[in-house]
Amino acid sequence: MFPGAIDVLPATYLDQLGTIFARFTTQDSGNFSYGVQTAAARYFVKTAGDPADTRPYLDFDGRVALLRTAAELARSLTHHTLPVLHAVIESAAGPLLVYDWRDGDLLHEPAARERFRALPTAEILAALDALYELHAALDAAGWVEGDFYDGALIYDFEERRLTVMDLDTYHRGPHRNTMCRMFGSERFMAPEQHALGAPIDTRTTAYVMARTAQVLLPEPPPAHQSVLLEATTTRFSNYQAFYEAWLTASSTTADSVASRET
Ligand SMILES: Nc1ncnc2c1ncn2[C@@H]1O[C@H](COP(=O)(O)OP(=O)(O)O)[C@@H](O)[C@H]1O
Ligand SMILES: [Mg+2]
């Protein structure tokens, strides 16, 4: 149903495809994205924005490169938290990535974040379990966290469904910090993401995921609390070790959380 390439501007094509009901054009990424309603479905279509726009940190080629990474990531695994990537359409303005539209609120918005943090502990744990299961699959496929923060999370409060998006700056394989302070949101970043030359790898992913729980879960059960503490102090040697410790904490706590909240 989607062409391999178009010879008009992305917005022109999308106007023909259906109705554009949302535009995301003010992001400092330089990317332009669209919500598009067709007869069949709603889609989230991401593009690298105006090729002539050099104001963003990344120039057009750099923005296109990140979209290629995003497409590679989407094709390397499927998970219920990830919007399905239906097509990559080539154009003079770079690729159009056509994803499923996902409903919900961006957890980077303060009101949504506070609403999420006020949910019952068991519901927050269920969302974190989904996020961590996704990262176990990403880690197994060789992906290392990059620039993850709550702006990559959409939560549908009615359906209790977590969506994870904008993983464009994830990196396949371990690498080294070449920037000193890397891109990222301070509250989520690992120490090595502030140290020139430091290895950025599966340990980094474990740290950032643990920080995510510390930001989003105000009252961790004691078993989870100690896993998060270890993950952010003495550290786990890889993501899998963190994930297994988290699962063990969940299985030993599930009953007591349920009995406290019912
Ligand atoms: N699949 C999706 N469905 C619905 N909204 C989405 C989807 N993916 C992203 N969004 C929304 O679009 C915004 C911009 O997308 P994002 O991937 O973060 O682009 P950027 O690279 O410009 O930061 C996000 O902040 C989020 O609100
Ligand atoms: Mg974003």
Image (cartoon, rainbow, N blue to C red):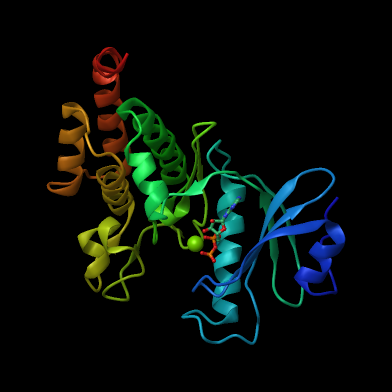
Farthest-out residue, left: 234
How many labels were placed on the picture?
0
* Image position, residue 193 (x, y; %): 27, 65
- Choose between 210 and 242: the one closer to the eye: 210
Q: Is residue 149 above or below residue 105?
A: below
- Choose between 143 and 33: the one closer to the eye: 33
Give the side of residue 145 with respect to residue 8, left or right: left
Q: Is residue 88 shown to the viewer in this render? A: yes
* Image position, residue 151 (x, y; %): 43, 56
- The image quarter containing residue 61 is bottom right
- Choose between 27 and 231: the one closer to the eye: 27
* Image position, residue 22 (x, y; %): 67, 59
Give the side of residue 100 with respect to residue 109, left or right: right
Rendered residue at 70%/67% (across/down): 95
Q: Is residue 130 above or below residue 12?
A: above
* Image position, residue 141 (x, y; %): 48, 45
- Choose between 251 and 243: the one closer to the eye: 251
Rendered residue at 85%/45% (across/down): 39
Rendered residue at 65%/82% (across/down): 51
Rendered residue at 23%/69% (across/down): 194
Give the side of residue 250 with respect to residue 169, left or right: left
Q: Is residue 5 shown to the viewer in this render? A: no
Q: Is residue 46 above or below residue 141?
A: below
**On-image quarter of the C terminus:** top left
